[in-house]
Amino acid sequence: MASTEGLVPITRSYLASYYDKYPFPPLSDDVSRLSSEIRSMADDLLNHLPPTQDESLLIDEADRQPPHKIDENMWKNREHIEEILFLLETSHWPAVLQQQSTPDVADLATNFRQLKDKLQHTLKFLEFFQSKNSDHVFNTG
């Protein structure tokens, strides 16, 4: 059995004291000001043009607190990628885009396909990463 001499439990306070040695530069006051201005513009837009039911769902999603755990963020990112991939399926494209009637539309369709390929690669990588992490967690102990 390996020696545990000299090891300390890694607690929230231990990590806080460790990271106190590496302070982050403070955020510019512009971040708060610009965030407030963007929110104000978005609220004005919503007052003049009320959102549809689907848009309201997106607004509610954006207004939620972000997940606090890395794993929750990864699952949320994975969910978003899967939804985008679903929408990038050719069968979900508008009819004009499916027909590719003009060179500009054909270029846009090509860009969508390239984006879909990149997102599929990203999704596979994320799935692999999550799988490996799960294996490490389950094999601990």
Image (cartoon, helix red, strand yellow):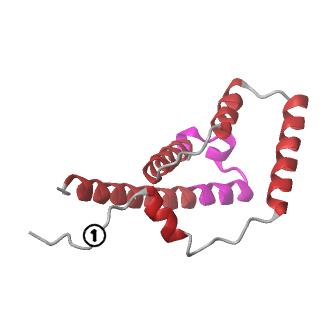
- Look at the magenta stretch and give its main secondary structure: helix
Q: Residue at x 91, y 30 (%)?
A: 48
Q: Position of residue 49 (x, y in %)?
A: 86, 30
Report the quarter where the C terminus lies.
bottom left
Q: Residue at x 70, y 35 (%)?
A: 59
Residue 97 left/right relative to 36: left
Q: In the displayed structure, would residue 73 be above or below residue 18?
A: above
Q: Is residue 11 left or right of residue 100?
A: left
Span highlighted in magenta in the image = 90-112
Decide which of 132, 113 is in the foreground and name it.
Answer: 132
Element carrying mark 1: loop
Q: Is residue 48 above or below residue 71?
A: above
Q: Position of residue 36 (x, y in %)?
A: 84, 48
Q: How many marks?
A: 1
Q: In the image, what residue type sits under mark 1?
A: Leu
How crowded is the residue under tag 1: few (<14 C-alpha within 10 Å), some, or many (20+)?
A: few
Q: Which residue is painted at 48% across and 44% down in the image?
A: 79
Residue 104 on the magenta span: yes
Q: Could you tell whether 139 is left or right of 81 in the image?
A: left
Determine the residue positioned at 45% across, 47% down.
75
Q: Report the front residue among 13 and 52.
A: 13
Q: Nearer the viewer, residue 82 or 5?
A: 5
In the picture of the structure, the residue carrying the numbered disc 1 is 7
